[in-house]
Image: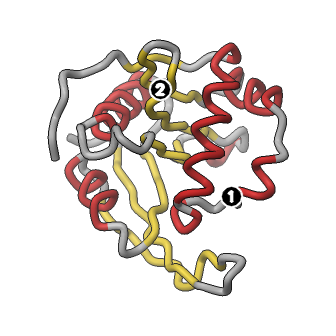
Amino acid sequence: MTSTPPLPVELLQPAHAAAYKRLRDLMLSRHPEAFTSDAQTEHHRTVDSYAERLQAGDGSFTLGVLQAGELLGALTCEISSRAKERHLGHLVAMMVAPGHQGRGLGGQLLAATVARARETGGLLQLTLTVTKGNGPAVALYERAGFRTCGCLPRALRLADGRLFDKLQMVLPLDTD
């Protein structure tokens, strides 16, 4: 991994929705096995629907790395509105643009997201899923302290019939 000087990680706002959609559409089309959403369906989503996601008034948030107006990476922490699950943050949609992968941006995004989650009152742990066999992503999450707590076999089925398992990972926030 070639590390580049850290770029600022910032809270994405509705004004970033078009850049977010461009990155998401690209990543979904290039890496269908890495996301539970599919490229064809998501391609038809409007920019406004992403603006709503980036507005997130429920404590959820999306952090991103921008350079010259281009979104290079993003990561979302979703917090459930259900009373019994408000102590959980679910990390979803980790994306780093092609050409910027392997340079430390994913680690920056993950560290900033974990730090913000720790500052969010009431969160006790973070969870995520990652496609089994995605060694670089699993290693990134493990370096951040996440541990595998389960595996859902055949969790994803692509249009071509290929099946992928998803590892379930967890990071307690209330212990160090």
**Residue at x 62% of width, y 75% of height:** 156
Rendering coords of residue 128 (x, y %) = 47, 55
Q: Would you identify the image quadrant in which residue 54 lies?
A: top right
Upstream in sequence: badge 1 or badge 2: 1
Which disc, if any, is residue 37? Answer: 1
Amino acid found under the numbered disc labelled 1: Ser
Q: Are marks 1 and 2 in contact (CB under 8 Å)?
A: no
Residue receiving disc 2: 64
Name above or below for residue 175 compared with residue 68. Answer: below
Name above or below for residue 47 compared with residue 40. Answer: above
Rendering coords of residue 139 (x, y %) = 24, 59
Q: Would you identify the image quadrant in which residue 23 lies?
A: top right
61 to the left or right of 104: right
Q: Mark 1 Cα within 10 Å, few/some/many (few <14, many 20+)?
A: few
Which disc, if any, is residue 115? Answer: none
100 to the left or right of 15: left
Q: Mark 2 Cα within 10 Å, few/some/many (few <14, many 20+)?
A: many
Dot 1: element: loop
**Residue at x 16% of width, y 35% of height:** 3
**Residue at x 68% of width, y 58% of height:** 37
Rendering coords of residue 173 (x, y %) = 35, 40
Most foreground residue, 166 or 49? 49
Amino acid found under the numbered disc labelled 2: Gly
* CA gap, disc 1 and disc 2: 19 Å
Q: How many marks?
A: 2
Most foreground residue, 166 or 127? 166
Most foreground residue, 132 or 2? 2
**Residue at x 54% of width, y 57% of height:** 30
Name above or below for residue 137 compared with residue 157. Answer: above
